[in-house]
Amino acid sequence: MQAIFSVLGIAPTRDTKAIRRAYAQRLKTLDQHTQAGEFEELRSAYETAINWAAQADTADDLPDAAVPAPFADDAAVPLADDAAFPGHVPPEPRQPLHQVPQDAALRSARERRRVVDTWVDELMHAQPQDLPATWKRLRADPALESLDSMADLGDRLLEGIAGQPDGQYALYSLAQHHFHWDQAAYRPRAPHAAQWLQRYTEERELWEQQPRKQRLRYERAIERMRRHPSPSWLQASQAEPAIHHASRHMPLWWSLHVPAALARQYTQALQSLPLLVRGIRKLRSIEVRWPKWYIWLFVGILAHGLSQWLSPPASSPAPSSQASPQAAPDPANQLRQVTTAAHDKRIYLITGPVAATSHNGNVLLEVPIPAYPKDAQDAQGTVQVTLTLTTGGEVQAAVTQSSGSASLDAAALAAAQAAQFEGKLAYAVHARLPFAFRAPR
């Protein structure tokens, strides 16, 4: 019995829990596929120790004790036959340790591996909503009742997820709850599975360090991606920040949560953005450090151009019945006041191309000076009146700036309408004349 417990690596004990723990720890150090003989020896020692601990009836079943040597005097005394001692019962011969044949061990290992691979394949291809029912059927399988079968299932399942993590977060979460992959004591057999588990643990810690609002935003983005597997460019644009950040900084975490086919659909949708949206994003990505004066100059020129483009064209005065087809230039240099001795009128001289058709090349404009109206009530001010001289000899007047008094405005307008000119004009002339009024003393 001492040899049995030496295989398990513990001292002889009748505590079945201690025996199972020792067996599970020793099992992790063996590869069941390449060390089939050692595994079967460990399995046989485990079963024998469990049976021995369960029987526990008499003290005769304890492990072998050292037998004291006979006394020296007893060596000279001939021992009688066992039958000569009345009531003596000879001990039963010790049963040899049960050894499993090598062929049977290999067949058992191959069958166990076949069952484990079948369940791993079924779990890997199950839909997330079908995983609880599949796991319940797995637990009811008699072939997986032993500890070594479940340990082998956990290792093989982790190897499958590490090889194909494409959207297997639901399966990983379910299996991790049963096999405790996140505990430091767990050691995967396959090196690539151990590396994958270490990297995923680091990325999960990085995810947990993100702000709560950012994690909620990414979780909503992943949920929207699952609800819309064929997105539009607008839906893909909304999920783009989560796709860009998570796939760049947490690739294993991202591949475990989002299937590769779904990620490709959103990547293709982002490549089919409208031309205007792509242009705006291109401008945003360019980092140009312009001087501040250049920015203000550009904005000023752009604003001036827009104001000129959006402002309505200036309204021209209504043409007279005998209007000339030639446009009138600015009369500022064509209208010059002539000093005269008359106190009741003002005389202006019109020169230049507009008066070229006159006999002497000049046109005289006489404008009467209005008298102060009696009903003005001591009001005073200046009235601006625009005169329009047509080629037919007509004079048109309009008040463009009021003095604030209706009487003064009416007097100035009447004086302007009474203006006369001598000569012929080549085209209509517009002139702005002031009429100043002062209250009489």
Image (cartoon, rainbow, N blue to C red):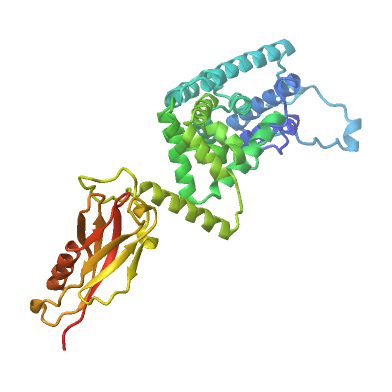
For the N terminus, the quadrant is top right
Q: Quadrant of the C terminus?
A: bottom left
- Comparing 383 with 193, the one in front is 383
Q: Give 173 or 225, whichever is nearer the viewer.
A: 225
Q: Residue farthest to the left?
A: 375
Find residue 231 and report its horizontal and vertical position in percent. Answer: 43, 28
Q: Quadrant of residue 255?
A: top right
Residue 19 sits above or below residue 41 on the image: below
Taking 81 as reference, is 24 left or right? left
254 sits to left or right of 213: right
Image position of 378 with respect to 337: above or below: below
Could you tell me residue 179's position as x and y percent? Answer: 57, 34
Q: As drawn, which residue projects farthest toward the front? A: 359
- Between 157 and 297, the residue placed more toward the observer is 297
* Figure label count: 0
Image coordinates of residue 114 in percent, x first then y, are 61, 14
Q: Measuring 34% from the left and 59% from the top, which residue is drawn there?
A: 362
Left or right of 165, for residue 187: right
Question: What residue do we see at 13% from left, 68% from top?
Answer: 410
Is residue 189 at all visible to an observer of this figure? no
- Percent position (x, y) of residue 226? 44, 30
Image vertical order of residue 101 relative to residue 77, above or below: above
Q: Is residue 307 visible?
A: yes
Q: Residue at x 46, y 50 (%)?
A: 213
Indicate left or right for 25 with 426 as reference: right
Q: Is residue 382 above or below residue 213?
A: below
